[in-house]
Image: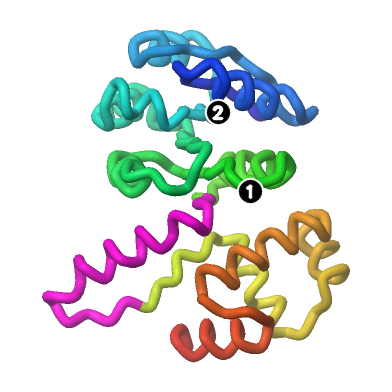
C-alpha cells in the first residue's frame, strides 16, 4: 500500500489530485494540507510514502519549502505536479529536491498513477515536456568544462525498456516481462522517443546505444 498525501492551495488542482490519490486500490489517501508546517506535522504523525505538491504551493510559499520539508522527512518521496508544462519553476523545483515532476496537461489518469507507483519504487519520473529544460541546464553546466553530456535522463524503467527494444521483443512480450500493461508500456516508449528526439524503435536504438556503448 502506498500512503499518498497532497499539498495544495488551488481548489481545482486539489480536487484533481485527490481524485488520483483515491482512484487506485494500491493507494491510501492520507489527506490534503495547505502549507509547509501542516505538511511537516502530518508527515511526522502518518506513515506517508509519497507527497504530491501542487506547483501553485511552490509559487506562493517558495521553493525553499521543499528543502525544509525534505529535511524533516528524508524517506518520503515528493512529486511536484503542474497542470501545464510551461512553468518556469519546473527545473528549480527539481534542483530544490523534488524527486519527480509530473505535468497533467495531455496526460491520462493511468499515466499519473503509474508515475506515482514508479516514484514509490525508487524511480524518478519526470514528464517529457520538462526534460528539455533539464537537458539545456546540464549542457550549460558542462559547456565551460568541455564535457560531452550523454545522459538522456532515462529512468530505470525506461532503460529496461530500451534494452528490451534492442533485443527485438514486441510490446506484448515486454509488458509481460515488466508486469505492466501494454498501454503503460506505450506511454513509456513515447516518453523515451521524446527524450531521444526520435520517432521509431530503430532510431531510438541507434541514438541511445551509439552514445552509451
- Which comes before the other along the chain, label 2 or label 1? 2
**Is the residue 94 above or below the residue 26 in the image?**
below
Magenta region includes residue 144: yes
- In depth, the one of 201 and 85 nearer the eye is 85
**Is the residue 136 above or below the residue 44 in the image?**
below
Asked which secondary structure carries label 2, the reply is loop
The picture places residue 21, in percent across and down from the top left corner, at 66, 25
Which contiguous range is marked in magenta?
Answer: 125-149
List the residue tagged with mark 1. Answer: 106
List the residue tagged with mark 2. Answer: 49
Horizontal side, residue 11 vs residue 142: left or right = right
Asked which secondary structure carries label 1, the reply is loop
The picture places residue 213, in percent across and down from the top left corner, at 48, 88
Horizontal side, residue 110 vs residue 98: left or right = right
**Is the residue 15 above or below the residue 162 in the image?**
above
Q: Residue at x 74, y 61 (%)?
A: 185
Q: Quadrant of the N terminus?
A: top right
Horizontal side, residue 108 vs residue 97: left or right = right
Magenta region includes residue 41: no
Q: Residue at x 36, y 59 (%)?
A: 133
Amino acid at each position: 500500500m502506498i500512503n499518498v498525501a497532497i499539498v495544495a492551495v488551488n481548489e481545482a488542482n486539489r480536487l484533481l489530485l485527490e481524485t488520483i490519490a483515491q482512484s487506485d486500490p494500491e493507494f491510501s489517501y492520507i489527506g490534503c494540507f495547505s502549507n509547509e508546517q501542516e505538511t511537516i506535522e502530518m508527515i511526522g504523525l502518518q506513515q506517508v510514502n509519497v507527497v504530491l505538491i501542487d506547483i501553485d504551493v511552490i509559487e506562493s510559499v517558495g521553493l525553499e519549502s521543499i528543502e525544509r520539508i525534505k529535511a524533516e522527512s528524508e524517506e518520503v518521496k515528493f512529486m511536484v505536479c503542474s497542470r501545464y508544462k510551461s512553468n518556469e519553476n519546473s527545473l528549480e523545483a527539481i534542483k530544490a529536491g523534488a524527486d519527480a515532476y509530473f505535468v497533467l496537461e495531455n496526460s491520462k489518469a493511468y499515466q499519473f498513477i503509474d508515475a506515482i507507483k514508479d516514484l514509490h519504487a525508487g524511480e524518478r519520473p519526470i514528464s517529457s515536456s520538462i526534460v528539455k529544460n533539464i537537458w539545456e541546464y546540464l549542457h550549460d553546466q558542462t559547456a565551460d568544462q568541455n564535457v560531452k553530456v550523454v545522459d538522456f535522463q532515462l529512468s530505470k524503467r525506461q532503460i529496461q525498456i530500451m534494452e528490451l527494444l534492442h533485443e527485438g521483443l514486441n510490446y506484448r512480450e515486454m509488458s509481460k516481462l515488466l508486469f505492466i500493461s501494454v498501454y503503460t508500456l506505450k506511454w513509456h516508449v513515447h516518453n523515451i522517443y521524446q527524450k531521444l528526439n526520435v520517432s521509431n524503435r530503430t532510431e531510438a536504438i541507434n541514438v541511445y546505444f551509439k552514445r552509451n556503448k
